[in-house]
Image: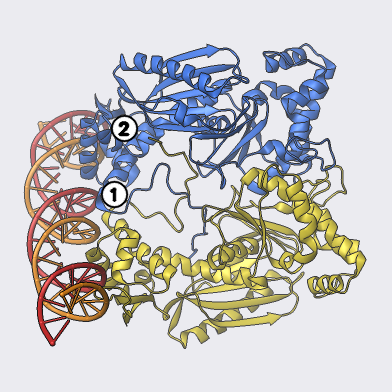
Chain colours: A blue, B yellow, C red, D orange
Amino acid sequence: MTAPLHEARPSGSGRALPDTQQGMRRRNLARVMHAVSAEGSLSRAAVASRIGLTRAAVSTLVDELIRWGLLEELGPERPGRVGRPGSALAVSGRGPAGIGAEIGVDHLAVCAVDLRGTVRARAVRRGGNRDRAPEAVAAELGQLARRVVAEAQREELWPAGLAVAVPGLVARDGRTVVRAPNLDWHDTDIGALLPGEWPLTVDNEANYGALAELWLGEDTPHDFLHVSAEIGIGAAVVVDGGLLRGTRGFAGELGHIPVRPDGPPCPCGGRGCLEQYAGEEAVLRAAGLEPREDRVGLLAGRAEDGDERVRAALRDAGAALGIALTGAVNLLDPETVVLGGALASLSPWLLPSLEAELTGRTAGPACPVAVSRLGPEGPLLGAAHSVVRSVLDDPAVVTERS
Amino acid sequence: MTAPLHEARPSGSGRALPDTQQGMRRRNLARVMHAVSAEGSLSRAAVASRIGLTRAAVSTLVDELIRWGLLEELGPERPGRVGRPGSALAVSGRGPAGIGAEIGVDHLAVCAVDLRGTVRARAVRRGGNRDRAPEAVAAELGQLARRVVAEAQREELWPAGLAVAVPGLVARDGRTVVRAPNLDWHDTDIGALLPGEWPLTVDNEANYGALAELWLGEDTPHDFLHVSAEIGIGAAVVVDGGLLRGTRGFAGELGHIPVRPDGPPCPCGGRGCLEQYAGEEAVLRAAGLEPREDRVGLLAGRAEDGDERVRAALRDAGAALGIALTGAVNLLDPETVVLGGALASLSPWLLPSLEAELTGRTAGPACPVAVSRLGPEGPLLGAAHSVVRSVLDDPAVVTERS
DNA sequence: ACTATTTCGTCATGGCCGTTTACAAATTAG
DNA sequence: CTAATTTGTAAACGGCCATGACGAAATAGT
């Protein structure tokens, strides 16, 4: 007989429901929603066997979810097997929607995603936000959000919450931007500046990017490290299907891992941080290029054209990334490392040196490195889906909100 | 209104009970045990208000736990407040016990801990295990364990499980020692060689040390990094009160974080790994000492005596540790770093340079570094307590086992 | 000393919820 | 066309926690 190992014990996505009969009911409602959502379409009997309840119990749960408008009956399944065919259930395409928003350095974006995961409305505004006052940015984002919500409402959707991705460190309260160097924001309670009509969450864009990868990626494992870069280098650590946030919410600060302890000084106070080698500024400088609008596109274009100086800069950046990731992989033992954001676009020139360092420094098989296929949409989609997940995680909330 | 952030979602310490009335009951039994265990002594009413159930419900739960011999009634509390005094409940000092064992490089140890957390029996055998066959070591450990169990049984305790700490990497199956360099074991199914009478778990000594710190330390937070060293340097990552294990169970390999990417080659394949600067062998070499029996005591003694070469070696090791920990802290944002095992004994000479690196490389307040007060007993106690916790986590198991 | 108040533990009742059992409906296999 | 299989529902059942009431045991106030 083998006893279980003690494991990390997260507190449940969403809040922890009390262990009373009502809480049990709510959790089982959630399990039904998750089961149907994961398969797209499922009969009551299939749900029952999947979540370990009886068909009778699932029937009453499904009845309730249909009454709330969260599930719909699609009609009888085409039978391939013996026996009476089941009646297909699917998550409703109307009702609650997740509103995702992104504050980027060069743009604002908002989208609405229904419970099925389909994007139903979106709006984008190009234009730099560097050094703009948070109030102005928030006001503009609020306008965009209201426009998207109005569009969604025309399709019988109502906003279940607003999730905002920002390029910076967010406190664990989910409202305060502690530091966003690229926007020059410090300790900004962005939550107070945004529309208050809907439940609000603010989080780091790297975290939302990782969640998008987790939920939308095809073969994304439950444990991985998601690395992205806009100007700084951020990472998100996903453990057992959930984000590792750290005590203050600052986990994943890959950019300031020491790569060469005696290297050039970094604004953070350290020396030889990863950002000094693989940060956007450092790479542009090494490549002999001036910062301008589309910096990533510029780098990719020049590298594509065979500019040897640019390629060398990216090669060096990849090597530095590889060294930092070796440390991270040793510490976390993730199933894969995923490169997202700008790193995904530049991966053809980063990967060789990155992987060389990583495999060269690892005994046994090295941790595989994958490139995100979600592209720059990741954080926005992750934000919107995080709201959708919160509804799937506790469907009963729709009875409390209108 | 603020919505919750998405968080790491561990699957519950112990197994996840199904969401049915029986599962609910079992979870509530566990919550009662944990409440009483945490306070030492508690009335039914106090338990009720603490875990959010009614007094009536708690009464029936307590009745059952008393019937099983897991709780006992201590009699009326001395009243300080108005109202009828409650009847004090305490965890039973008889019944199930956790058997912890440790395979060290230079010793074997076994102990029995009752549900209250008191060590009730122990046995130690000194003598090196380097390069001994796993079969011989396991046989000897089995004898020791049987002796301890016999002694415990004389005090009306019965073994609820055996947890074994080993100085090496353990696979997630909780039985196989993948690599234990100090013992020269490779892919050894130690579970098959140990007594099979009790539920068995095998884990890394660093992990058990961290759990001991978590459960027995006084102000230990829920999120911390526990660093220990015997010959290699291991760390355990505790997130939200649970261990982060990694995909293969290899998380926490601090020893092979690159400190100086162009440094001396390491057997792992890398260059400049932490172990090359702060590993026991490296430190002894830098200190100009020969490896012998009590290596840590030797170092501490010489440093105490003012041997400048030894002090310099420890200073350099501390600095290397500081660099590696800077990376780890940036990645994980723990509440504290705890130095355990040999590092605790050597901390007076390691800490200054370690903290200098750590604070010097951190913007804002640096992560505090604490020293474990559990000493070399940590892993053994952690192992035994892990079995105790498994009973507290699901008290109903006692009805299944005799 | 006596009463009012507070708190504790228990009991009876009730409601909620998943299970069990049974059955009709709808399909395939032979 | 019958037997076997599977689905969904309904009714009875049992487990579990909440509610409300009550006696017991302490304090506070007069």
Residue C30, above or below B59: above
The percent coordinates of residue A351 (x first, y second) are: 73, 28
Percent across and percent down for residue A69 are 25, 28
- Please state which amino acid type lies under the numbered disc 2: Leu
Between disc 2 and disc 1, whose residue precedes? 1
**Element type at mark 2:** loop
At a point 31% along the width and 13% down the height, the residue shown is: A154
Q: State left or right for residue A162 relative to residue A278.
A: left
For the image, the number of numbered tags is 2
Q: CA distance from mark 2 to mark 1?
A: 22 Å
Name the side, left or right, on which B305 lies relative to B121: right
Q: Vertically, is B308 above or below B355?
A: below
Residue at the (24%, 75%) spot, across then down: B84
Which image quadrant is residue B190 in?
bottom right
Residue A224 in sight:
yes
Residue behind mark 2 = A42
The residue singled out by tag 1 in the image is: A24
